[in-house]
Image: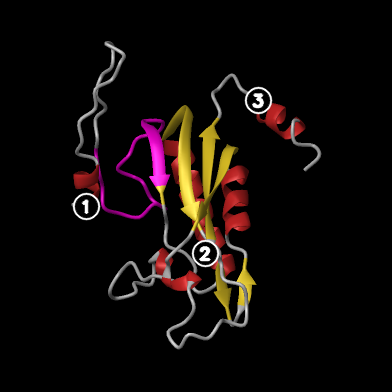
């Protein structure tokens, strides 16, 4: 309901040939987009749950991505999400995923590089990495007693913007351009 509301806005394009897109929403699991046909989506924008930080279901369903404690298991599940995203996305179109890292027992858990790698592994190329700075968030302020944490707070998230290559493009072209990496 919230998604449909946010997508309900008017748009006055400059292009007279513009055709309003068909907007469909589904409730389901990003690891299985079986209601969506291959190469039919123009844009994917997602902010999946990660690292058991915020529960997305009240019952903490076993299959819910937000209930996975193991980063290895989470990465494996995100491989399925990436595979489904590239399957449904039209060639040349974009997939944007907002992810953050986490802390466990005051130690930094680098989730975002692992998610980045699974999306690259399924065939996406990275168009942009936009750093979203966090401010006035519970995780970036002093704790309730006014004392400082004994570690640096995570003050950003990564917005990875991937592109699905067109059939006439070669992934080798992109790999060769980043040999320094």
How many marks the image carries: the answer is 3
Q: In percent of the image, x 34 and y 74: which residue is there?
A: 60
For residue 37: magenta? Answer: yes
Q: Give the label, 1 or 3, closer to the camera.
A: 1
- Decide which of 107, 121 is in the foreground and name it: 107
Q: Secondary structure at mark 2?
A: helix
Task: Read off the residue under disc 3.
Answer: 170
Residue at image location 55% in from the left, 69% down from the top: 102
Q: Which residue is mark 1?
A: 2
From this viewpoint, which residue is outermost toward the top?
A: 16
Task: Estimate the x, y position of residue 157 in percent, counting from the top left.
Answer: 52, 56
The reply to whether the C-beta atoms of the residues labelled 1 and 3 are less than 8 Å apart is no
Q: Residue 52 occupies which quadrant of the picture?
A: bottom left
For image coordinates 41% across by 31% down, the residue present is: 39
Of label 1 and label 2, which has the lower sequence position?
1
Q: Is residue 79 left or right of residue 10?
A: right
Q: Which residue is mark 2?
A: 74
């Amino acid at each position: 309901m919230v998604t449909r509301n946010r997508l309900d806005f008017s748009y006055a394009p400059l292009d007279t040939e513009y055709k309003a897109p068909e907007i469909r929403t589904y409730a389901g699991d990003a690891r299985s987009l079986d209601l969506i046909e291959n190469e039919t989506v123009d844009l994917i924008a997602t902010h999946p749950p990660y690292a058991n930080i915020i529960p997305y279901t009240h019952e903490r369903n076993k299959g819910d991505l937000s209930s996975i404690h193991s980063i290895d298991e989470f990465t494996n599940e995100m491989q399925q999400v990436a595979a489904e995203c590239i399957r449904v996305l039209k060639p040349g179109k974009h997939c944007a995923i907002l992810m953050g890292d986490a802390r466990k027992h005051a130690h930094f858990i680098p989730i975002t590089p692992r998610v980045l790698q699974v999306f690259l592994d399924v065939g996406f190329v990275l168009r942009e990495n936009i750093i979203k700075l966090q401010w006035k968030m519970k995780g970036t302020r002093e704790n309730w007693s006014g004392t400082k944490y004994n570690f640096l707070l995570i003050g950003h998230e990564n917005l990875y913007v991937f592109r699905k290559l067109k059939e006439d493009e070669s992934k080798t072209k992109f790999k060769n351009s980043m040999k320094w990496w």
